[in-house]
Image (cartoon, helix red, strand yellow):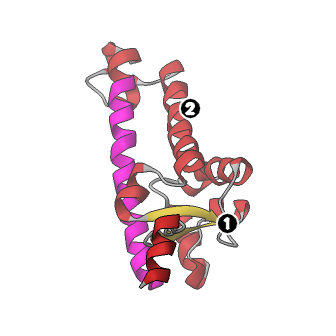
Amino acid sequence: MEEGQILGRRVAAALVDAGVILVLLVLIASLFGNDELSNRSLWAETQGGPRVVFFLLTFAYFFGSELVWAQTVGKRLLGLRVVRADGSKAGGGPVFIRNLVRLVDWLPALYIVGAVAVFATGERRQRLGDLAAGTRVVSVTAPEPPEQPPPTAEDVLASVLR
């Protein structure tokens, strides 16, 4: 698959994941937020403890989904997954590092540092978290057809008698 297509799908997947994170922010603001600040913004409502909960749950969303399925909701919908640089399954360490560095990728806002890194890495199209963790995002390939079960004794006998 062409790298430009994967990049476009990565951006779309990031937008889907941003929607998931926005829902998380709304839930935390409504459950734990400061109602006195509700005339300002959801972000203002989540000062202090609720904001810490938001960041921890956001990290848990990315880390947990990429550790278990190698995909977030956005990546799953767009047919992408996270793998090690050699194409093998990314384990807990690389997924943890990848998502810890996401905080830097987000700076100053909206993945600007991450976007610069993606364009600076040429055809590899890796953000800082991928570079630090030795991971990359790839297109999900079509699953291989399941292997045929071994023939039964009746199948063998029938083929011999033909």
Quarter residue 30 falls in: top left
Q: Which dot marks residue 88?
A: 1
92 above or below 37? below
Q: Is residue 4 visible?
A: yes
The answer for how far apart the CA atoms under marks 1 and 2 are is 27 Å
Horizontal side of residue 130 vs 57, given as left or right? right
Amino acid type at circle 2 is Leu
Amino acid type at circle 1 is Ser
Q: Is residue 17 within the magenta segment?
A: yes
Horizontal side of residue 8 vs 53, given as left or right? left
Q: Which dot marks residue 151?
A: none
| Residue nearer the viewer, 148 or 139 | 148
Q: Is residue 114 within the magenta segment?
A: no
The residue lying at 52 percent from left, 25 percent from top is 53
Q: How packed is label 2: few (under 14 Cα within 10 Å), some, or many (20 or more)?
A: few
Q: Where does the N terminus fall, quadrant-wise?
A: bottom left
Locate residue 7, reporting x and y percent. 44, 74
The residue lying at 39 percent from left, 54 percent from top is 74
Numbered disc 2: secondary structure: helix
Q: Over which residues does the magenta segment extend? A: 1-28
Locate residue 86, reporting x and y percent. 70, 73
Horizontal side of residue 42 vs 71, given as left or right? left
Locate residue 45, reporting x and y percent. 38, 23
Residue annotated with mark 2: 56
Numbered disc 1: secondary structure: loop
63 above or below 123? above
Select label 1 or label 2 by which is in front: 1
Q: How packed is label 1: few (under 14 Cα within 10 Å), some, or many (20 or more)?
A: few
Q: Main secondary structure of the magenta part?
A: helix
Quarter residue 25 falls in: top left
| Residue nearer the viewer, 149 or 29 | 149
